[in-house]
Image (spheres, rainbow, N blue to C red):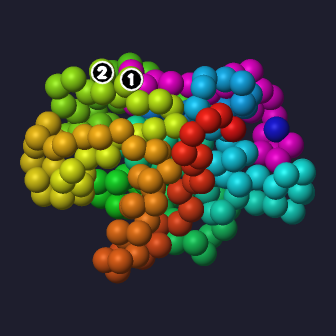
Amino acid sequence: MLQLRVGARSALGALVLHSGGLVVDHGRVRVLAGAPSGAAGLPGPARVNRFPAAFDPAWRPLGALVVAHDVLGRVFALNGHEAACGRPGAPGQMLCFAPDSLEREAREMGCGTWLTWLLPGRLDQFHDGLRWPGRQRESQSPALSQGIAGYPFLRSKEARADSAATTRTPVPLTELPTLSSDFCRQTGLGDPGFLGSFPSEGPA
């Protein structure tokens, strides 16, 4: 709570203080929170955002504070206040890095509004085009330290045309943002910025 610089009455503060995280949409979206004794395998924000071992009043997140991820490799983060980092949106707004577009997208809402937005039905529109028959069962199958890698990759024309035809395999979650970052740099799209440091297994 001290390192996050949020109060217990804020949405993020209340979530971190009173829960071990949220698992939404049949396990597809995982919102990070406080207690490491929460759902097995769901990392805490301290590890994902590389908090210092002891409280450091001078420490700041690497551009944006990662607060959630999904099973396909999307990363949700709270935009920082550094204006020169090239991120879309305004400070304090939620951002989403999408592995199909390989871009950060501004959600034009703060963390509290975004958490309220994560209700059944709304995610259907957000994941439009990446929902296939049996997706609920597949999203529930991996451990919370795992994601689902698709081939052809989500960014390919083949996957965009028919996501149900892709081959999907559970992989350590840490591989998905790493693959996206590497592809961005190798193809000249630039560094997407910090996407979180996800452990390959076990709670944090």
Left or right: 141 with respect to 113?
left
**The magenta segment:** 2-28
Any mark on residue 140, and which? 1
Q: Identify which amino acid the numbered label 2 is placed on.
A: Arg
Image quadrant for the N terminus? Answer: top right
- Disc 1 element: helix
Residue found at x 9% / y 48% = 161
* Outermost residue to the bottom: 188
Residue found at x 38% / y 23% = 140
Residue found at x 61% / y 23% = 39
Q: What is the number of callouts on the image?
A: 2
- Res. 51 visible in picture: yes
Residue found at x 59% / y 46% = 199
The residues tagged by marks 1 and 2 sit, at their Cα atoms, a distance apart of 5 Å
- Check disc 2: other Cα within 10 Å, few if <14, some if 14-19, many if 20+: few
Q: Position of residue 168 (x, y in %)?
A: 25, 40
- Disc 2 element: helix
Report the front residue among 173 and 46.
173
Q: Position of residue 13 (x, y in %)?
A: 74, 32
Q: Identify which amino acid the numbered label 1 is placed on.
A: Gln
Whether residue 26 is in magenta: the answer is yes
Report the front residue among 27 and 93.
27
- Check disc 1: other Cα within 10 Å, few if <14, some if 14-19, many if 20+: some
Q: Position of residue 153 (x, y in %)?
A: 24, 54
Q: Position of residue 24 (x, y in %)?
A: 46, 24
Q: Quadrant of residue 27?
A: top left
Left or right: 52 with respect to 133?
right
Q: Are marks 1 and 2 in contact (CB under 8 Å)?
A: yes
Q: Mark 2 highlights which residue?
A: 137
Whether residue 8 is in magenta: the answer is yes
